[in-house]
Image (cartoon, rainbow, N blue to C red):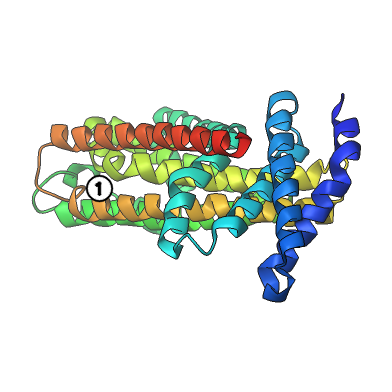
Amino acid sequence: MNVKQFVKLHREEWKELEQLVTALGKRRNTITGANITLFHRLYQKAAQNLSYSQTYFPTDEVTHYLNGLVSKSHNLMYKDQVSSFKQIRYFFSTKFIGLLLEQWKFVLFALILFTIGALGSFLSVMNDPLHLYAILPADMAQSVNPEQLGSHDGAVDSSLMSASIMTNNIKVAILAFAGGITFGLLTVYLMVYNGILIGALAALFWHHGKSYDFWAYIVPHGMIELTAIFIAGGAGLLMGYKLFVPGQYSRGYQLKLQAKRSVQLLLGTIPLFVIAGVIEGFITPAAISLELKYIVASLTVIGLILYVVIGRLRLMKTTKGFDS
């Protein structure tokens, strides 16, 4: 059975379940014994369809659609039993990871775009340091002094530089997501440009023999912060790609579907930015050894890996619950 046959065979049942979920969620007087029985039957069938679709059509739109339909049905079934706190915890601990694993190719592409920009500007400034003033914004180029980085009297400047980069990255993350509406073109530009800024700064500090010091002030909060930016960029690229290549669906439908999914990806980055901000405020400017700053950066990477691994295990457990 191909995907078109699969959709044609079950489309009416999915539509009926979607209408029932909407009705039961809005109007309590529609909750009758017959409706509850019908809801359970359609929900179980949709969960089975989701399992089949994940096996045979893992990257097709129908799998994403069924995943959303089953999730909405599951939430409706347990919404009176689940507190808002638990719903939030479920989103950040499980659902967000599921979305991230589904769309990892777009996140990876955002990383690649950033890397291309960073390498290009790094090589350019290494070739001629004066290129720095053509690449960086004037205020940033004039405020950066590699000789002050790490010195006691320059500690505040170092912190302000990191804060400036973090603020810029948060704005980039929001704009990168919103850039999806431009068919992803703005998102591509922002990923490359943000990489250009980092690459140019890295080359400047390399010229002054301060590369080790520079990264010690960047990576403690930067590992989490850049991860969040790549996720936001991936969200924008996802929306842009689906608008550019809508497949068998209309662009209006794709915009509605992908915008919701992309917003969820963006929301999932909020805790990452909060953690990065705390680290930037207390660890980055702290009078501790550079080695300790690198240890903090390593711990953030380990934390990110564990977050994804544990989230994936939770997701697998939830999926098994659907199948049963």
Q: Position of residue 255 (x, y in %)?
A: 75, 54
Instruction: Please give the name of the residue rendered at 83% of the width and 53% of the height, measured from the top-left corner.
Output: 15
Whether residue 203 is visible here, answered yes or no, is: no
Quadrant where the C terminus is found in the figure? top right
Instruction: Please give the name of the residue rendered at 55% of the width and 43% of the height, measured from the top-left corner.
Output: 191
Instruction: Please give the name of the residue rendered at 31% of the width and 36% of the height, measured from the top-left corner.
Output: 303
Q: Position of residue 86 (x, y in %)?
A: 42, 57
Quadrant where the N terminus is found in the figure? top right
Q: Position of residue 84 (x, y in %)?
A: 45, 64
Q: Amino acid at mark 1?
A: Asn
**Which quarter of the picture shows residue 25?**
bottom right
Q: Which sits in the foreground, 304 or 41?
A: 41
**Which quarter of the picture shows residue 288?**
top left
Name the residue at the front extreme.
Answer: 33
Whether residue 71 is visible here, answered yes or no, is: yes
Q: Secondary structure at mark 1?
A: loop
Instruction: Please give the name of the residue rendered at 75% of the width and 61% of the height, measured from the top-left corner.
Output: 35
Where is mark 1, residue-wise?
A: 145
Q: Which sits in the foreground, 35 or 15?
A: 35
| Relative height, residue 238 to residue 251 (above, below) | above
